[in-house]
Image (cartoon, coloured by chain):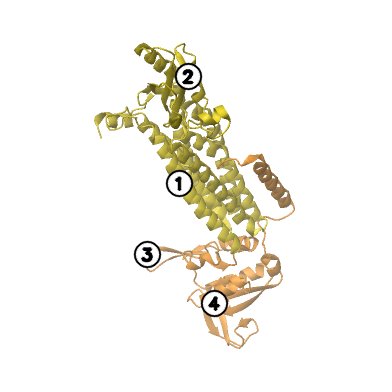
Amino acid sequence: MVVQGRGGAQALVGLAAALVLAGCGATIPSDPEGTLDRVTGGTLAVGVSLDEPWVVLEPGPTSDDVRPAGIGLQPAGIEVELVEELATRLDAEVEWTVGGEGSLIASLEEGDLDLVVGGLTSTSPWSQKAALTAAFATVRGPRGEDELHVWAAPMGENAFLVEVDRFLLEHRERG
Amino acid sequence: MTRTARRSLTRRPSSFGHTSLPDEQQEALRRAEHLAWWTIGFLVTAVVAVYLAMGSSQAMKAAWAEDMLSFIPPVTFLVAVRIAGRRPSAKHPYGFHRSVGIGHLVAATSLVIMGTFMVWDSASGLLAAEHPPVGLVVLAGQPVWSGWLMIAVLAYTAVPPVLLGRAKLPLAVALHDRVLHADADMNKADWMTAAGGIVGVLGIGLGLWWADAAAALFISGSILHDGVRNLRIAVTALMDARGLTVDGEPHPLDEQVDERLRALPWVADAQSRVRDEGHVFHVECFVVPRGGLRLEHLEEARRAAADVDWKVQDVVVVPVAQLPVELLPGRDEDEHGGVV
């Protein structure tokens, strides 16, 4: 790279200094869309796709907390329990949306969901559309390779992502 | 490949073709080669570290690509210097000095191609409003925000190139080596890539999603700028432009050779046509003798021109009754202040 005059270099140093000063008043990282603030003490919108034993659906009473409305099913399973624990930590109510991975990820991109869970692994092709979290479980896959189980969070909501990562790292286990 | 040619590739050259180097240039060449190897060694560590810390940051990706591209100039320099060291042969009577120009052209072209691709990549990331996710990594058992790791790695890559670049610049001037000069220039300004990357990652940290792509665009833009600038210089040199310094200014040697020849008592007028072959100049001197011309005069003129500088060894002296205007364009411009 070639110096394009002193002006460019000075502008860069100035910009870095401004960012550092701005950083003093803010938490790093923070969310462009404020997901963590909104969820904490509020509602955690979670999309679930069926993948035994991580997410299963059990017949249950029709509940306002589960969409589509009137589905008459209740999510359960390893990941659902983990989500509920995370919600307790964030002092949040969980609102479940049951659907296929594709439509759930699309809702995540739109900002209608805060998390998508259901047997996702770190090699998931969704990594271009969603932020994959830290792995909470390592499972021997069908071909003998290690599969790292992860969740999907909205892109770039890094305060929220770090909070979820920290929670999952604390609950990490080898299966 | 002949045996001599093969040997000249493996042995450290102390000459450029049959131009033997003065002590200062030999020392400069030795140090420049050491620095090239140090640069390659540093780049290996930088590329590995940046790759491991990269994550989803566009700016980190751009910084990584720049580090990868930074391998080209020192490698090109080492190869070009070895090839230029070969003696002229029947097949290559002018020697192998052009290897420098070819290396320069190849390096510049790769910068242009990569720069264009990266400008496109980061601009489309910016337009698509991509929000880069940066989560936690576990480092020595401790969860750490990856952004801090990225910043630490970028800070590491900022300092050594600047020192290397500063050390190389005077050597490039001493050796009249454009590849080395381009390399030094890029190294010297490399801290801006690192600083740009740090700004981008800090921006992500502050929730400014666009800062990352904007920083990547800045880095890619500077790669492209480097490429275009070097491409222009390399092509100019290969097009047999007049002798230029490594900075692209007209080289003072042209004038010095002419003045030396005009100072000879038997010379009425003299002017040379100088071709920059790479490290060395090939000079054709046209001299208009006063009265009778003897063979010793021509020998004297050849030695006088060659004594001006180590770069001027390959000298042809042509006695003429009148300076050939068509072979010395620009002469009338100088004397009459306008193009004929």
Q: Is residue A157 above or below residue A64?
A: above
Residue occupying the point 57% across, 58% down: B123
Mark found first going from the N terminus, 2 or 1: 1
Furthest toward the left, the residue is B2
Q: Please, what is the three-letter code of the amino acid marked with disc 3?
A: Gly
According to the picture, the residue beneath numbered tag 4 turns out to be: A103
Q: Please, what is the three-letter code of the amino acid marked with disc 1?
A: Thr
Residue occupying the point 57% across, 50% down: B221
Q: Please, what is the three-letter code of the amino acid marked with disc 2?
A: Asp
**Colour chain A is painted in:** orange
Mark 4 and mark 2: span between their CA atoms? 85 Å
Could you confirm whether marks 3 and 4 are on the same chain?
yes
In the shown orientation, is residue A15 left or right of residue B144? right
Quarter occupied by residue A72? bottom right
According to the picture, the residue beneath numbered tag 1 turns out to be: B109
Mark 4 and mark 1: span between their CA atoms? 44 Å
Viewer-nearest of labels 2 and 1? 2
According to the picture, the residue beneath numbered tag 3 turns out to be: A144
Mark 1 and mark 3: span between their CA atoms? 45 Å
Q: Is residue B28 above or below residue B147?
A: above
Q: Which chain is mark 4 on?
A: A
> Around disc 3, counting alpha carbons within 10 Å, would you say few (fewer than 14), some (14 to 19), or many (20 or more)?
few
Could you confirm whether marks 2 and 3 are on the same chain?
no
**Colour chain B is painted in:** yellow
Element at label 1: helix
